[in-house]
Image (cartoon, helix red, strand yellow):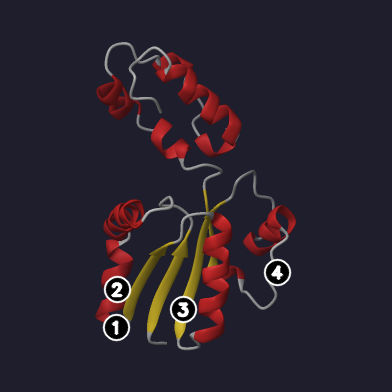
Amino acid sequence: MSGIAIYMEGGGNTSATKAALRQGMDDFLIGLKNSARAKSWHWKLVCCGGRDQAFNAFKNARNSNSSTIVVLLVDSEGPVNGRPCNHLIARDSWDMAGVPDDDVFLMVQTMEAWIVADLGALQSYYGQRFGGNALPKANDLDTVSKIDVANALDQATRRATPKGI
């Protein structure tokens, strides 16, 4: 092996928003990045925007990089029962033929669950009119559906500010 390439969902549709996410994820994954570099492996993190774009970029990279570990990182978009590839076949009808489960990583059902997890940061950002009581109280926010997280954030921020969610 000569490197690791991670193709991930997220970052929106502009190069600026993709760059911002890439920088944050690069910092978040610094331990993995440093381990790769210690082996003289190259490191590549690609924020692809939508999940279909991430999957297509992942498949293209797998077809062209035999000496690179190519990884897909996408939201699960719902509860996961079973292996990652089987989940994506059932949910998205993606062709996962030949893709080992070790090359596929599923994030939470929705990235907004990570935001909801930091009540203090939300209160600081939105101020006194933030309705934190509207947020889910689950210990495991990944058990809360995507729609429930979005509705809770909408309710909590409704009166807080014109900033929106």
Q: Which residue is mark 3?
A: 69
Q: Earlier in the sequence, mark 3 or mark 4?
A: 3
Q: Which residue is mark 2?
A: 35
Q: Is residue 135 left or right of residue 21?
A: right
Secondary structure, mark 2, is helix
Q: Quadrant of residue 127?
A: top left
Please, is residue 99 above or below residue 31 in the view?
Answer: below
Estimate the spatial distance between the alpha carbons at disc 3 and disc 4, rounded to whole Å. 19 Å
What type is the residue that disc 3 sits on? Ile
Estimate the spatial distance between the alpha carbons at disc 3 and disc 2, rounded to whole Å. 14 Å
Rendering coords of residue 55 (x, y %): 57, 65
Residue ID at (56%, 43%): 109
Secondary structure, mark 4, is loop
Q: Is residue 1 left or right of residue 55?
A: left
Estimate the spatial distance between the alpha carbons at disc 1 and disc 3, rounded to whole Å. 13 Å
Q: Which residue is mark 4?
A: 95
What type is the residue that disc 4 sits on? Asp
What type is the residue that disc 1 sits on? Lys
Is residue 109 among the parts visible in the rendering? yes
